[in-house]
Amino acid sequence: MSQNDMTIYDHIEELRKRLIIVVVFLMFAVIGGFFLAQPLIKLIQNAAIVQDLTMNAFRITDPFKVYMQMAILLAFIITSPLILYQLWAFISPGLLEKERRVTLGYIPVSVFLFLLGISFAYFILFPFVIKFMFMLSGNMDIQTTIGINEYFQFLFQITIPFGLLFQLPVVLLFLARLGLVTPAFLSKIRKYAYFVLFVIAAFITPPDIVSHLLVTVPLFILYEISIWISKIGYRKAQAAEKEHQEKQN
C-alpha cells in the first residue's frame, strides 16, 4: 500500500507498530546499559582531567541516579540507528525511489556526527571548562568539593547538546532534499544563524574568550559546511524531481 492510499488510521497504526519496535529494543538496550554504565563511569572518573579529584555523594541516592542516567543515555545511543531507521521507514513511502536510497545513508552519518559532537565536547571543551572553574575557585580562595551527581549532570549538559548540534548538516541536507529549504535561503539568514549559534555557545561555555571561541568557531564552520552540503542535496533533489516529471509526461 502506497502512502497516498493510506488513511489516517493506517498512518497511526503504522506509527504505533514502529514505536512498539523502538520501545522493545530500547528496553533491551537499557539492560545492556546496566552492564556498561559502571565501567564507563569509572573510566570518566579516572580520566586525566579529574584524576586528582575525589567524587563525593551528597545524597544516598546520588550514585544510583548517575548510574541510571548513564545506562539510559547509553541505551539511547545504542538504539539511535534503529530509531532513525524506523523514522526513515515511516516517511520513506512519501519519497521518490532515489530519495529513499539517499536518505537511508543519512542514518550512519547522523550517528557518527552525534558521537563526533560528544567527543569534541568531552575531549576538547570539557577540560577547558573544568580548568576555568577551578582557576576561578582558586582565585577566590574557595575549596571545591566535587559531587558525583553535579559533576555528571554538568558533563551531560555540555556533551549531549553538542551531539545534537552536530546533526545540523544532516538536518539541513534532509530539508534541502525535500525542498523545504534552499541554499540561497540558508545563505540569506546566515547572520541570524550566526547570532543564534553565538548565543548557544555563550550558554554552554564559561565567560572567557578562549572557551567561547573554542565553541563558536566550530559551530560557524559547521553551518558553512551545512550550506555547502545542502547545495549538493538541493541540486540532486531538483534533478530527481525533473526526471520524475519527465517520466510522468
Image: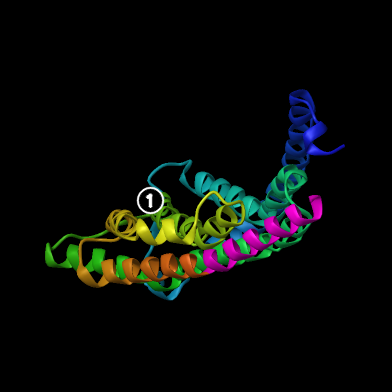
* Residue 39 in view (yes/no): no
Q: Measured from the top left, where is residue 168 in percent x and y?
A: 49, 59
Q: Which residue is mark 1?
A: 150
Frontmost residue, 235 versus 107: 235
Magenta region: 229-249
Q: Residues within 10 Å of mark 1 (few under 14, many from 20)?
A: some
Question: Is 165 located above or below residue 248 in the figure?
Answer: below
Q: Quadrant of residue 8?
A: top right
Frontmost residue, 41 versus 6: 6
Q: Secondary structure at mark 1?
A: helix
Frontmost residue, 28 versus 228: 228
What secondary structure is the magenta-colored segment mainly? helix
Q: Measured from the top left, where is residue 155 in percent x and y?
A: 42, 58
Q: Measured from the top left, where is residue 114 in percent x and y?
A: 55, 62
Q: Measured from the top left, where is residue 131 in percent x and y?
A: 28, 70
Which amino acid lies under the numbered mark 1 shown in the image of this protein?
Glu
Question: Is 4 located above or below residue 68 in the figure?
Answer: above
Identify the residue at the far left of this view: 140
| Residue 184 is inside the magenta segment | no
Identify the residue at the far top of this view: 9
Identify the residue at the far front of this view: 249
